[in-house]
Image: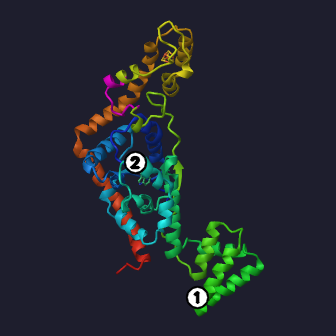
Amino acid sequence: MYAERVVSGMRPTGALHLGHYHGVLTNWVRLQHEYPCFFFVADWHALTTQYDNPSSINRNAIDMVVDWLAAGVDPEQATIFIQSRVPEHAELHLLLSMMAPLGWLERVPTYKEQQEKLSSKDLSTYGFLGYPLLMAADILIYRADKVPVGDDQVPHLEFARETARRFNHLYGREPDFEEKAKEAVKKLGNKKARLYAELRTRFQQEGEREAVEQAHALLEEVQHLSVLDRERLFGYLEGTGKMILVEPEALLTKASRMPGLDGAKMSKSYGNFITLRETAESVGKKIRAMPTDPARIRRTDPGDPLKCPVWQLHLVYSDDACRQWVEAGCKSAGIGCIDCKGPVIDAILKEQGPMRERARFYEEEPDLVRNILADGCEKARDLAKETMRDVREALGLGYS
Ligand code: TRP
Ligand code: SF4
């Protein structure tokens, strides 16, 4: 019934690094050719943890969009926009908050985890508790069925699915609901199916609340029902309708293969990263300063690539011939570490070449970026408004 659609967002945390490129951005660039894609700057989400220091959000947001464009996200293919410029996200968040069980929010694992991790900040706020609900609104408002995220976001996606399901259960039904519900009735077995049908009729024809309660008790007893079938049977008791919100699915981003300067995963918080637009000079400096196999104290000491973070980068960037040269040269002390680092530096500079060029183009034309975002916001808003019409209607706020 609804078109396939991809939506994803990123918090504006500052310059993106090669880990973002190899993990998230190459994935986005691929997806933009396969589906209608909506990529946005989650600036409200940044505020949930950064409410005490919002001054960098604006600049970070624009820098991040330039990084996306530099990496090859194409505004002709994908819709690029800023969350706070589509205020419908906030309206949906508010309406969903009416029916979002507090317990669900408190049980999202990232809630306690992040509070502990960022213990220097007071995160016992309303907004931070609502982080997953805002994210659910971001996704559900586009009725997106696919959400590319890293595995740290899976609990949030699960929360969004449950929210959609609850909303639809309360205010609407799926398109082929009747048929599916009837099939689910059959799964109850003859005797229970007959009782269920009888109770349903009693409620629908006589309006007996008690019949609904009895039917609920009956359904609670049945063990072998799937969650969805159970939901359908609960819904079918009280009526039929249409599906309003779509349950989204996570498209898991492959774990980034990008190791950092110290061999650990490249990450902003470890300070072991190279940014997309890092200058050539700085790239050279950072790679030349990388630690190597500690056994290679002198140039004449042989080493073992498996004990060296530079080797990890060869695994990302070098072809077989180069890797053989490294292995042989390292183990025999035939090459020095500076020699060994040369091809890595070259490969990173080569990868950054087109990115740096595209970034320069956009840096010189800030109006262009503004226009891309204005267009993107408008397109996103058109779709968001459509969903909100149905949502308001379903909640009795149609006023037409
Ligand atoms: N929480 C996501 C992250 O930290 C960012 C995000 C906000 C998001 N809203 C979203 C991702 C909607 C996908 C879809 O990475
Ligand atoms: Fe690492 Fe290369 Fe030096 Fe070997 S030669 S220790 S792989 S940098």
Check disc 1 and report the residue beneath it.
209
The answer to whether the residue bearing label 1 lies less than 8 angstroms from the nearest atom of ligand 1 is: no
Question: Which region of the structure is painted magenta?
Answer: 272-283
Check disc 2 and report the residue beneath it.
118
Point out residue 181 in the picture as x, y percentages from the top left corner: 64, 74
Point out residue 157 in the picture as x, y percentages from the top left corner: 50, 56
Q: Which of 386 and 297 is in front in this view?
A: 297
Q: Which of 371 and 44 is in front in this view?
A: 44
- Horizontal side, residue 213 vs residue 314: left or right: right
State the residue at coordinates (77%, 79%). 190
Is residue 243 something one can see in this rendering? no
Q: Is residue 276 magenta?
A: yes
Q: Residues within 10 Å of mark 2 (few under 14, many from 20)?
A: few
State the residue at coordinates (67%, 76%). 219
State the residue at coordinates (44%, 36%). 19
Q: Residue type at mark 1? A: Arg
